[in-house]
Amino acid sequence: MATKKPGNANDEDLFDGMSSIGKPLDQPTIMSYFIQRIRLGEICREITDKFPLLETDFGNPDFEQIKEIDRRMCEFSQSLPPFLHLNYDMSGIADSDPSRSHGITIYRYVINSMLHTQRCRLHLPYLSRGQDLYSYSRDACLEAARMVIRTEAQLSSEDISFAMTRLRFSGSLLCVCMAIIALLMDLCRNKSLQPDEDQERRAEIQNALRILEEGKSQSSFADKLLDTFNSILQRSKVPLPSERRTTRSKNANRLKSPVPVDSALITGRSDLLDTEAMVTEPVPTLSDDIWQAFDATADPTTLFDWNSLLSELDAPFLSV
């Protein structure tokens, strides 16, 4: 069934009898995020359609298909409008410019979190296989995990209300959780890490866990995830670098009391967030159910097979 895709336009720009609808994609509108979300969703749907072939063993289909999917994700990232790039330079841009709006700022972080989490999830099954054949996936998985943490770090420094309440959305927690799983799995299973790489990985895990620590006051699920990861670290005998108690982020300090959060904060249109979760298979299954997780009313414990995800880490041979 052919469906006409939305145009890149604001509601106030539309009128009866228009010959064409939509501005160039490099101009921000209320539809900018949704157009890019559709594009990413089409890639993820193709992956989901192929995954029955991927669930049997790592040799079928050819690993080149995984790299082709990854190439498409990277091309998608590069083709995002400039105002949706994490390194978007707003110096010299007028305060009244739409690209400076809180809505576009939120869209920027949400679309990047989704993209890099899906990329991390794509490569996770190959992360710990050890063979040189899969070194591409290891590098890509770790790069994506680091980008998830970078995205969270940048968002936490933004002077917008969503930055203070983002961890109430299970989608944000999923992204951080996926990054931690990748970093911790590489630390525990990669016996060829050099001492400096080992310490760097431990520091990265520690930084990621701080995000969950910050989220404890906003979500009981963040508290449960943090306890789970700490338990895995203890049983796996993986000590993290000791640290002095630091001052909490300015956003964390500003969050004095619960703030009502509506899913429309992310999209401006909560009706577009009711995407049906497509699958609840364990990794490596990919789907667009992460979008449903960005609904503030969603129950995070029902969206994903968390036990399967975490069981990848909680194995007796992970002691180091």
Image (cartoon, rainbow, N blue to C red):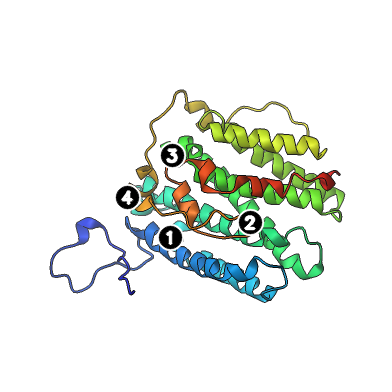
Mark 2 or mark 1: whose residue is earlier in sequence: 1
Q: What element carries label 2?
A: loop
Q: Does residue 89 appear anywhere in the picture?
A: no
Question: In this figure, which residue is indicated by the disc labeled 2?
Answer: 283
The image quadrant where one finds the N terminus is: bottom left
In this rendering, which labeled residue sits more in front, label 4 or label 1? 4
Question: In this figure, which residue is indicated by the disc labeled 1?
Answer: 37
Gap between marks 2 and 1 measured at Cα: 22 Å
Please, which residue is most extreme toward the left here?
16
**Which amino acid, mark 2?**
Val
**Which amino acid, mark 4?**
Asp
Q: Quadrant of residue 120?
A: bottom right
| Residue depicted at 41% across the width and 63% down the height | 38
Q: Is residue 222 above or below residue 293?
A: above
**Which amino acid, mark 1?**
Arg
Question: In this figure, which residue is indicated by the disc labeled 3?
Answer: 162
Gap between marks 4 and 2 measured at Cα: 28 Å
Mark 4 or mark 3: whose residue is earlier in sequence: 3
Q: How crowded is mark 3: few (under 14 residues within 10 Å), some or many (20 or more)?
A: many
Residue 271 tag number: 4
> How many numbered discs sit on the rendered protein?
4
Q: Is residue 285 above or below residue 234?
A: below
Residue 146 versus residue 6: which sits nearer the camera? 6
Residue 259 versus residue 317: which sits nearer the camera? 317
